[in-house]
Amino acid sequence: MTQATLSVRPVATKADRKAFVDLPYRLYASDPNWVPPLKDEVHGLIMPGRNPWFEHGEAQLYLAEQGGRVVGRISAHIDHLALGQPADKGMGPGTGNWGLLEAEDEATAEALIAQAETWLRGKGMHRVLAPLSISVWDEPGLLVSGFDHPPTVMMGHNAAAYQGWVEGQGYSFAKALKTWDLDISGPFPELVNRIVAAGEKNARIRIRQVEKSRFNEEAKLILGILNDAWSDNWGFVPLSDSEIDYVGKKLKPIVYEDLIMVAEYDGEPVAFMIVLPDINEKLVQFGGKLLPFNWAKLLWWLRRPQVRTMRVPLMGVVKRLQSSRMASQLAFMMIEFIRRTAVTRYGASRGEIGWILDDNQGMNAIADAINSHVNKDYWLYEKAL
């Protein structure tokens, strides 16, 4: 029997977008470590008008079809803010991206990646950094190790075969993003405890939790520190004001004021740490849908979640302090204060820190000092067009 022709075409209609969003639910139906995202969240990610990334970025979505079935998908996109970043920091002029890749087989992945590259060339790009789904602030990187357990909230998961398929298209390793796993049920090593105790006696240091009644103001404060703290990081693209507002609204239902700390030094906010209860532990039961009754279950759970895992997605110290001992002390203090709360109020026993760039010596040293170990690796790849 002759095999049906494989074709790749742009997403053009509402039905196409639905097919784009729905595909992973079929491909990963038998994967126990895939957590179905809420479909409305995925629609929000890819739709101009809902995701403020599109105020400075453009994207084209594609579907692969064979024999009347959707067998793959990909996004090709350009972030115009990223084009203005220094070339030695990962992004830079002429660098486009693709992401959200899903495919039934290698031939489909090859066709989709080729189509994304064609679109990027047509836009004047001469280099690809991928995968990014859609920005470095969403789900960057391809999972290459750590397939034996589910990802935590806001982290990605993909089939192990994808690594070979991507590398087979001429892509080479660019950067590793690591997540670190740790036991938080007991105290940290004695050296860390001494550093924390010394900080608690220092009248110039104040570690405070955020005030949810002033959430918008607090979110802007934290993300302002983030833009400063991360500005020299590889792959950094600053968050716009619209994105800061968007992130604040998106996170508000799953943030708890006793799990977010701001560190002040001489009265000035200089560092922050955000910890999220792993909502994936609940979402895995929902199949990506809130209706008809899952919304009520989720709202009940959100009142006071009891979880095994807490994730640290973001932490930052202002640039002027980053080479000082103060930076590590503030980090250890925030980590310890939140650890106590996570265990006593939320029943947590495990933490996950990341992602962290493989060459971020400061953060990797902090993770190592509290007896963490790397549990997942996500790789970014590059290719000249």
Image (spheres, rainbow, N blue to C red):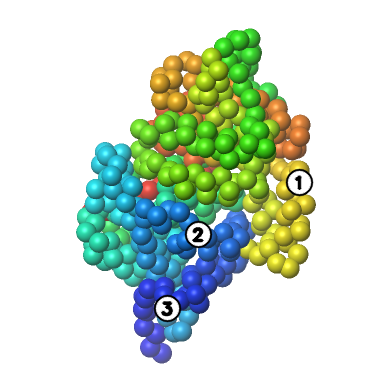
Neighbour tally class for label 3: few under 14, some 14-19, many 20 plus, Cα within 10 Å: some
124 sits left or right of 130 in the view: left
> Disc 1 on helix, strand or loop?
helix
Whether residue 360 is visible here, answered yes or no, is yes
324 sits left or right of 209 in the view: left
Give the mark count. Answer: 3
Q: Looking at numbered disc 2 in the image, what kind of residue is underneath it?
A: Arg
Q: Residue 78: where, in percent of width, then height?
A: 33, 56
Q: Is 28 above or below relative to 301?
A: below
Q: In the drawing, what numbered circle is on residue 50? A: 2
Q: Which residue is mark 1?
A: 303
In three-dimensional space, the C-alpha distance between marks 1 and 2, rounded to whole angstroms, equals 26 Å
Determine the residue positioned at 71% across, 30% down: 341
Using the rendered view, name the quadrant where residue 238 is placed: top left
The residue lying toward the viewer, choosing from 344 and 144, is: 344
The image quadrant where one finds the N terminus is bottom left
In three-dimensional space, the C-alpha distance between marks 3 and 2, rounded to whole angstroms, equals 27 Å
